Every structure is written in C-alpha cells, then in structure tokens.
Amino acid sequence: MSFDLVFFGGTGDLTWRKLMPSLFQAWRHGKLPADGRILAVARDERDDEGYRLWLKERLQAADSAKRPTEDEFTRFASLIHYLRMDLSQPGDYLRLKGWLDTRSADTTVMYLATSPHLFPVICEQLGACGLNHDRVRVVLEKPLGHDLASAQDINRAVHAVFTEKQALRIDHYLGKPSVQNLMALRFGNALFEPLWRRESIANIQITLAESLGVGTRGDFYDRTGALRDMIQNHALQLLTMVAMEPPSSADADAIRDEKLKVLRSLKPFDAASVTRDVVRGQYRSGSIGGESVKGYLEEDKVPTGSRTETFVALRCEVQNWRWAGVPFYLRTGKRLAHRHAEIVVNFRPTPHSIFPGASAPNKLVIKLQPEDGLELHLLAAKGSVASAGAGAVQETLSPVSLDLDFDKAFPTDRVGAYERMLLDALAGRLNLFVRSDEQEQAWRWVEPILESWRQDPHGLRTYGAGSWGPPAASALVARDGFAWAEEA
Ligand code: BG6
C-alpha cells in the first residue's frame, strides 16, 4: 500500500513530541507501509533538509531506547518532506495538490494537528481543490470545540467536505494498550461478563492523574481547563468502554453505537447536582518527588487571578438496567502526587463471611500508565492459622493480587497509543476513532457543568501540588461509603 501522510501544524508541539516520534517507532518496527511519503506543513520558510535537521534535534532528545541512530534517522528522514503554507491562502492548497499529484497514493491522510479554529478553513480549502476524494481521510486532533455549539460548527464544516467515514476524531487514550485489553477482557473472556453489573459491582473509579503542570501551554490550558481537556474526551471515552453493552461485532459502528448509548444514558447534571457531585480545584505550589513546584497562578502565560480548574472529580451514574445506582467516579488533575492512570472496578463484599477479621472486597484494576496491566485483588488463606482460644484454630485471610504485566506477557510487538492511532488512520480502521454523534453527546453532557460554573465562579477549591486534589474530592466518594483507591 502506498500512502501520503500530511501533518498540518508540522512544527507544532504535538507533531514533534508525539506524532513524529510515534511514526519513527512504527517505521523502526517495520509497521509502516513501505511506500510512504510524510509531508510536514507549516508557515515557516524552510526546505526539506532544514525541516529534517530541526526534527532530528528533537528526536535525538528522546530516551536512549527511542532515539534514532544516525543511520536510522537518515533512512527515516528520506520519507519526510516540508511544504510552507499559509492556511488561509487558496493558492497554497493548489501547491499542496500539485505535490500530492506527483503520484497517486492508495491513501492520503491529512492530519490536522493545528488549532481547531483552523479545521473549517482547512477542510473547505481541501474540498475546493478536490482533495476530499474517497482515498483521502482527515484526522482531527482534540480539542474539537470548546462547547457543544462550537463542536457542532466544526462538524458541520468538516462534513460539508468529508463523509463521517473519512473524518477520524482522535482520542489517543483509546489507542493505549490497556484500553484494547479492556475490550479483550470484557468481550474475549466469559469470566467477567456475568459479574459486570450492578448486582456485583459497588462502584467504578477512573483516575487520570498527572504530576506535570501546564508547562509551556499555560495560555492554551487557561482557555481549556481540566473538564474540557480530559473529562469531556478521555475520561468519558474510558467510561463508555467500561460500561458499554457487548457489541454485536468488532465493526467500528457496532462498537460506536454501544458507546453512544452509554453517553446517552448518563444521568444529566443540573445546577444542584453540579454543586453536590462535581469538585473543581486549582493547584497551589507544593512539592512532587522532593522537588518544589510552583502554583498554577505562577505558571508562564497564565493570566493573573485565573479561575481555571486544573482538577476535577465527579460522581455520575449510567441510567440503565445494568448500572442503575452504581456510582462512577471520574477524576483528573495536573500536579497530583504522581503520574498514574487506572480504572478500578470495586466489587461488592461477600454477602456473609465465615472467616474472622476484616474482609476486603475484590477489586479489578486496569492500569493504563505508567505500567500497563491488570491486577485482580483477592483474599487468600496464608496457610498459617491463628489460635482462636480454647484450642480452636481459625483460618486468617490476607489480601493478595494476581498481576498481569502486559509488557512482560507480550515483550515484543507492543505499540504505543499514537503509533497505533496513526497506523489505524493509514489502514482506515475506524474502531478507535470517535464518531461525531459520540463527541457531541459528550459535550451535551458536560455543558450543564460549564454553565453552572459560569454562574458560580466561587466553587473553585485549591490543592497543594503533590497531593491527590482538594479534600472535597475524598468527601465526594466517602459520602457513599467508599474511598479512592489510594485511600482505601
Ligand atoms: C492531552 C491533554 O489530551 O492528554 C494534556 O491535552 C494531557 O493536557 C495529555 O497532558 C495526557 O496524555 P497522556 O497520554 O500523557 O496521559
């Protein structure tokens, strides 16, 4: 298969931090179709060689295992080209078309790694010069809008030019290996499905914690906040994968139909439930891993007195027969104690215990990062017995866990999230891309939260960098008689 892959935003952060390194790994592992051209598009005046040198410096700053050797870079770089474009100029799209038309690739992928306000104009111009034929696909990076109306505007503009099957909305969390394994666990094994419901599950927790702050992205982040940056997309997508009904096949639409049903079943928020069930916070200075770090308001490019949230914890419910009454707790934040993403499924306790001492209910932990694996927490008899007085002896149970480390189980052939998403985009596999109706429904659900925060700017709490967020986040879970995983 021959392909052309065009990166709009070719000098942007995402391109050099994630996309090019992932593409390099795919190439290094022999997964990239051989006959490919990669074209970076940006405004600066450069030529192919200048761009390759610029990229080389960045790829060489990676960890040693991921760094290209001289020879590898030279061979990889021969696929890479550069085109200067002003995205508002129709003539520049004709130059792009001229470049692409020097051959007829089986697949052309336009990856829009620009600010989303440019998506409509890019799509319109691609359409105007015929670059929307059926061998072209367009990949749309998040954030796709900042509310429902702006997301719908973008979708209208994209779909005036590209069909739904040509428009791939990326959520890189869906490309993480553990998320693939969640599907395998649920629908490739008979073991858990009978338990995967309200009768057996007490609550589900999804935590996406980062120890980093906003870094150099203070201005972008301040306009976005944690709810839009992580909850509306990544956390809700994970929730749909946990809560969805078994799809009738592995076909992209069969899966996406089921995910959409979950989003539609989420209990809507109103002003009262936002106040009760949603906690937002902003980090103050503190210390992480022994290092002092500054507070959000002291970060570069963050406006004085900003009230943007860098932490959200919320409680929600999926209103259907499978999940009625089971709380789902979602939580994300910057500058938390450590980088750590996981889904914890807490099972109900046994109905009656014949063993003395405290009982710890079973728990399944799907670990997304930093490690990628599964942990099943059980109680087991140690083999020793405690004296219960009067000569009687009793078994004591201790918590143990069955650990599956996917890196050890499958030491080769593992692909990272962006690598997977790029390969899927080239192959036209749509399973892991978000359909427009899913994305709009997710916005519909978070809108009352945004609205209620607009009305009540005073509900923002603070938390020390290096903590697990404001104490109110613990209280939110404790109110139901539960605790976050690290507090249990
Ligand atoms: C991005 C957010 O979508 O995901 C960032 O915009 C965040 O703010 C990042 O840091 C986290 O991704 P990962 O894969 O490093 O957990």
Image (cartoon, rainbow, N blue to C red):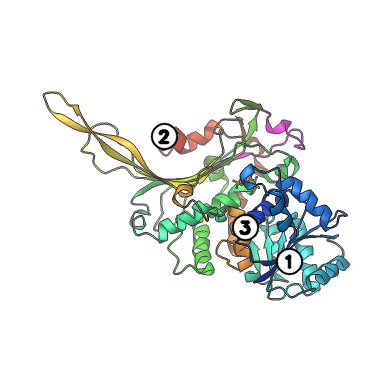
Give the total of numbered labels. 3
**Secondary structure of residue under mark 3:** helix
Identify the residue at image location x=74%, y=57%: 77
Name the residue rendered at 13%, 28% in the picture.
392
Between disc 1 and disc 2, the foreground one is 2
Q: Quadrant of residue 162?
A: bottom right
Magenta residues, start to end: 293-315
Q: Which residue is mark 1?
A: 157
Q: Is mark 1 within 8 Å of ligand 1?
A: no
* Residue 350 position (above or below residue 159): above
Foreground disc of the pair 3, 2: 3
- Residue 299 within the magenta-colored segment of the rendering: yes
Q: Position of residue 345 (x, y in %)?
A: 42, 47
Amino acid on which the number 2 mark rests in the picture:
Ala
Label 1 Cα crowd, 10 Å radius (few <14 / some 14-19 / many 20+): some
Helix, strand or loop status at disc 1: helix
Q: Which mark is residue 488?
A: 2
Residue assigned mark 3: 26
